[in-house]
Each structure stands twice: as structure tokens, then as C-alpha cells.
Amino acid sequence: DQQVKQNSPSLSVQEGRISILNCDYTNSMFDYFLWYKKYPAEGPTFLISISSIKDKNEDGRFTVFLNKSAKHLSLHIVPSQPGDSAVYFCAAKGYYGGATNKLIFGTGTLLAVQP
Amino acid sequence: NAGVTQTPKFQVLKTGQSMTLQCAQDMNHNSMYWYRQDPGMGLRLIYYSASEGTTDKGEVPNGYNVSRLNKREFSLRLESAAPSQTSVYFCASSDRRPLKDEQFFGPGTRLTVL
């Protein structure tokens, strides 16, 4: 049962245009969402997050939008740059009986930004 | 600060062999995690340690054991490796702070079981 879904395995965008990566979740108890970026042969690195009490969070070229009623979040990258080419993972914070901040990850979307 | 370090970077095992993956963090984080990443599956939590002295199962714990040696180190052991354990393994650490719940990942260990 995939609680966090990224239905697009890949996305190709021209340099300078907007990249929109999507993520859907099923558990309404999730209260914090994160995006991670992963280059080949490296570990994931944190990119941006959003609390469930907000619907938007911006950090430079990156904006995350949260639509709680639709259980959907999206990551917008504007303008896209070739260095943004990576796999992007969506993650949601879930609890399993009083544990720490365990994350549930989506399957990832490979973004390719064409020069 | 090195952040989260993992050894080894690569390993090839034969079915039935055992090995331990090492992880250390220098950020004074309380919590540490082991994930595996497989194609089309994202990152799945194997085991985690909320604090020194405690460990708990994650989503896919079968075939693995862990040890939280001290606050810095968290190891993952495969007692009898199987081809299904071929994967990339990531260690992560975190410390809960208000509105800052991100985990920090190591570079990964690529394991192949023949």
C-alpha cells in the first residue's frame, strides 16, 4: 500500500521553463511534507518542506504547494536549470506508535532539464 | 563536519555470507535510520533508532539486524545475505526541531549479493 505516490517516473523540461513535480498521499494524518533531491551515486539531500498548516512555502527558485483537501502537493522550480537534473523524492512524516520523525517516501521523479 | 558517513561504498557478497554496514554522524543527532533504495520502490525504512539505546523495526526489517553502538554510530548487519538484499543502502540521521524535521543522508552503500 503506497501511502505516498509520485505517478510520473520522469519529466523533461527546457532550461528556463517551469518544472512541476507532483505527489499524492493517502494518509490524512501526515502533518509535514518534504522534498529531497538526489544525484547519481549520492545520498538524498533536503530541498524544501511544508507543514500541513500552510499551503505554500517558497525558497528561492523552489516553491512547494500543498492542497490538503486533494491530498496533493507539488514542487515548482522556476526557472529550471541544467543543474536541477536529478531524482526528486517526495516524503511525508508519519508516526508508528510514538516513534521519531519517520518519513515515508514516494518512488521518485527523474527530472531532466535540457539546455 | 563530515555529516553522515557510510562504509563501505561498494560490496559484493555471495549468498549466505554476512556483513555489517557502518554508519556514523557528527551532528549530535538523536535519531538514526537505515533505508534501502530499489528501482521503482523509492526509499524504504529498514530499521531506525529514535535515541541512543533504542532500535525499532521499519517497513522492511526481515533479514537485517541493527546496533546503535553509541550516539554517533548505527550499524546494519546482514547475517545471511540473499540476492533479494541487492540494493543501495542509505543511513540517515535527524534531530527534531520545530518546523525542521529533515533527515540528513549518507552517500550510500551499493551492495550486490550473488
Image: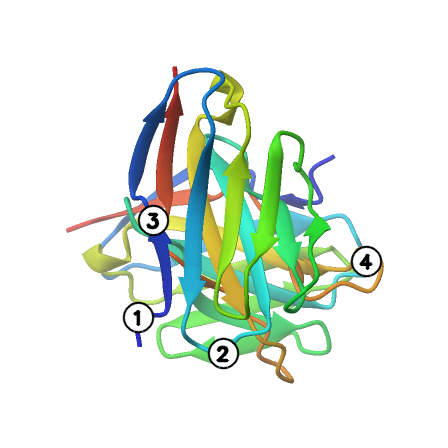
Q: Residues within 10 Å of mark 4 (few under 14, many from 20)?
A: few
Relative depth, front residue between B12 and A3: B12
Foreground disc of the pair 4, 1: 1
- Identify which amino acid the numbered label 4 is placed on: Ser
Disc number placed over residue B28 in the picture, else none: 2
Judge depth for marks 2 and 4 and give the one in front: 2
To which quarter of the image does residue B39 belong?
Answer: top left
Quadrant assignment, res A79:
bottom left
Residue that badge 3 annotates: B7
Q: Earlier in the sequence, mark 1 or mark 2?
A: 1
Give the residue at x 54% y 23%: B80
Q: Amino acid at mark 1?
A: Ala
Q: Is residue A82 left or right of residue A30?
A: left
Question: Where is residue B7 drawn, in percent x and y?
Answer: 34, 49
* Comes first in the chain, label 1 or label 3: 1
Q: CA distance from mark 4 to mark 1?
A: 36 Å
Chain containing the residue with disc 3: B
Q: CA distance from mark 1 to mark 2?
A: 12 Å
Q: Are marks 2 and 4 in contact (CB under 8 Å)?
A: no
| Chain under numbered label 2 | B
Indicate the position of residue B88 as horizontal and vertical percent values.
Answer: 41, 37
Please name the residue that numbered disc 1 is placed on.
Answer: B2
